[in-house]
Image (tube, grey):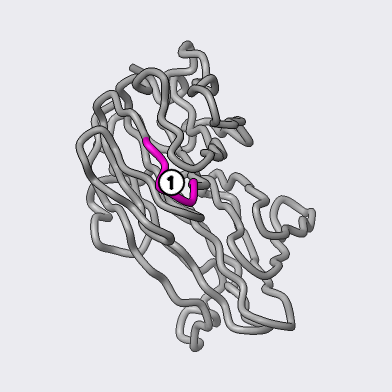
């Protein structure tokens, strides 16, 4: 199947205390990140704040006693309808989707979830990545310069980066800024950085951003 047949989708699912999905979400490559509260999968795996889960089988989620806000990424065939009607006490919305046409369909892929944190006034020098992905700002504020335009994001805002397009990121002057992202990358990058700095003079400069890895799993497509 061609990479053009796939897209990465990002959903925000808010569970009331103890709410449980009325039916399993269909099998597909999926990452669930716990932004608030806690949740348990039907396989009795629990995730708390700032923890992530990856699976390929059908799955049902049950929120903890305080509820949960789950950030959900799915690598889906474009012909599949987005899954948002999860059940009573659950509000779900697809926030963003992006095409996979910038990654080579002939290669084997992996699905990565990590976070990037900046100190006050930190930046990521102009760079590209080896695959597409969706980022969601978790704290602070950030400006993203790409394709001749600047975009400002606040907590909860998502954005898509295709990968080969040069990007410059500037964090806010006050407080730390952090985003969580899911990217689809070539398998040979397992455990390795996907970033490439565009300007040679930036490659040896000290970098202010810090990374935290959650998921780095081979996937089938």
Q: Residue at x 41, y 38 (%)?
A: 103
In terms of secondary structure, what is the magenta stretch mainly?
Answer: strand
Q: Is residue 213 above or below residue 89?
A: below
Label 1 packing within 10 angstroms: few (<14), some (14-19), many (20+): many
Please name whichever residue, 50 or 20, is drawn nearer the observer in this view of the structure: 20
Q: Residue at x 30, y 22 (%)?
A: 27
Q: Residue at x 72, y 58 (%)?
A: 153
Span highlighted in magenta in the image: 62-67
Please name whichever residue, 123 or 42, is drawn nearer the observer in this view of the structure: 42
The x and y percentages for residue 162 are: 55, 44
Residue found at the far top of this picture: 79
The x and y percentages for residue 76 are: 42, 24
Is 197 a magenta residue? no
Check disc 1 and report the residue beneath it: 131
Q: Can you tell which quarter of the image residue 186 is in?
A: top left
The tally of labels here is 1
Q: From the viewer's perspective, tell me whether residue 111 is left or right of residue 199.
A: left
Residue found at the far bottom of this picture: 206
Is 66 a magenta residue? yes
Q: Is residue 192 above or below residue 207?
A: above
Q: Residue at x 32, y 58 (%)?
A: 214
The x and y percentages for residue 113 are: 38, 53
Q: From the viewer's perspective, tell me whether residue 28 is left or right of residue 134.
A: left
Q: Is residue 154 above or below residue 77?
A: below
In the rendered image, which quarter contains the C terminus? top left
Secondary structure at numbered mark 1: loop
In the rendered image, which quarter contains the N terminus? top left
Please name whichever residue, 135 or 92, is drawn nearer the observer in this view of the structure: 92
């Amino acid at each position: 199947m061609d990479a053009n047949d796939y897209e990465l989708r990002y959903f925000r699912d808010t569970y009331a205390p103890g709410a449980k999905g009325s039916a399993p979400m269909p099998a597909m490559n999926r990452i669930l990140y716990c932004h608030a509260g806690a949740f348990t999968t039907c396989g009795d795996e629990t995730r708390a704040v700032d923890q992530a889960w990856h699976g390929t089988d059908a799955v049902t989620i049950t929120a903890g006693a305080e509820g949960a806000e789950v950030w959900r990424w799915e690598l889906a065939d474009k012909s599949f309808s987005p899954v948002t009607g999860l059940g009573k006490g659950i509000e779900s919305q697809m926030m963003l989707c992006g095409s996979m046409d910038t990654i080579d369909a002939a290669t084997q892929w992996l699905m990565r979830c990590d976070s990037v944190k900046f100190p006050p006034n930190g930046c990521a020098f102009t760079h590209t990545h080896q695959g597409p992905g969706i980022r969601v700002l978790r704290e602070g504020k950030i400006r993203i310069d790409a394709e001749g335009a600047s975009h400002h994001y606040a907590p909860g805002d998502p954005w898509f980066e295709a990968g080969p397009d040069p990007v410059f990121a500037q964090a806010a002057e006050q407080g730390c800024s952090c985003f969580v992202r899911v990217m689809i990358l070539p398998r040979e990058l397992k455990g390795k950085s996907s970033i490439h700095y565009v300007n040679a003079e930036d490659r040896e400069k000290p970098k202010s951003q810090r990374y935290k890895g959650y998921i780095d799993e081979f996937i089938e497509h």
